[in-house]
Image (tube, helix red, strand yellow):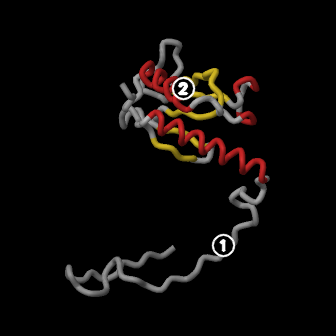
Amino acid sequence: MSTHTPARVPGGAPDGGQFATTAKTEVDVTLAPGAAGLDDITPAEKARYTHIESRTKDVAAALGAGKVWDEGGGTTIFFDARSEEAPEADYAYCIEPEHAADPSQGGKWGFHRGDAGTPLSNGDWSQDVTSDLTLDSDPAAVADWIKGQMQHFGTPGAPA
């Protein structure tokens, strides 16, 4: 692999320098059909995912805290990390039935207490808690449960 360092030009020069536009060759890569996994999703799965995403956004709005996105494991409400030394943030999520370790937890709301940099009293570095509230429970009730977990675990930005 070779590197090329463009010639430097004085500040304010209209063209040239390190960030000037240059011609580049195209990369010879072709993605296989279904590479993103979206070709395999059925209409029923898409409807379920859309429902989970919508309900999660409703809960986050009722909670008034956290950021909602899907980083690949399902739509989740993420909260701020405790510190740079303990970067794993706490988060709340609806447990999808096919990902539940215990089938009775599928479709219920969960809260993950991230690594705070020190172990819990039982020696674990993180903890997951499951509620009895389901995906279709009142978003305000779910938000109250999540708020209680945030206060219990000292989650940064916990609503008062």
Q: Which of disc 1 and disc 2 is earlier in sequence?
A: 1
- Residue reaching furthest to the top: 121
Q: Which mark is residue 141?
A: 2
Specify the amino acid type for callout 2: Ala
Q: Is residue 112 above or below residue 44?
A: above
Q: Which mark is residue 48?
A: none
Q: Residues within 10 Å of mark 1 (few under 14, many from 20)?
A: few
Q: Residue at x 41, y 35 (%)?
A: 81
Q: Is residue 130 above or below residue 43?
A: above
**Which of the two residues, 123 or 43, is positioned nearer the viewer here?**
43
Q: Quadrant of residue 86?
A: top left
Q: Which mark is residue 29?
A: 1
Going by the image, does 35 lie left or right of 129?
right
Q: Residue at x 57, y 47 (%)?
A: 71
**Which of the two residues, 15 or 42, is positioned nearer the viewer here?**
42
Specify the amino acid type for callout 1: Val
Q: Residue at x 44, y 21 (%)?
A: 153
Give the quadrant of the C terminus: top left
Tag nearer the camera, 2 or 1: 2
Q: Is residue 101 above or below residue 96?
A: above
Q: Quadrant of residue 34?
A: bottom right
Number of numbered discs present?
Answer: 2
**CA separation in Å, label 2 and label 1:** 48 Å
Residue 47 lies, in percent from the top left, at: 72, 48
Residue 110 lies, in percent from the top left, at: 59, 28
Q: Secondary structure at mark 1?
A: loop
Q: Residues within 10 Å of mark 2 (few under 14, many from 20)?
A: some
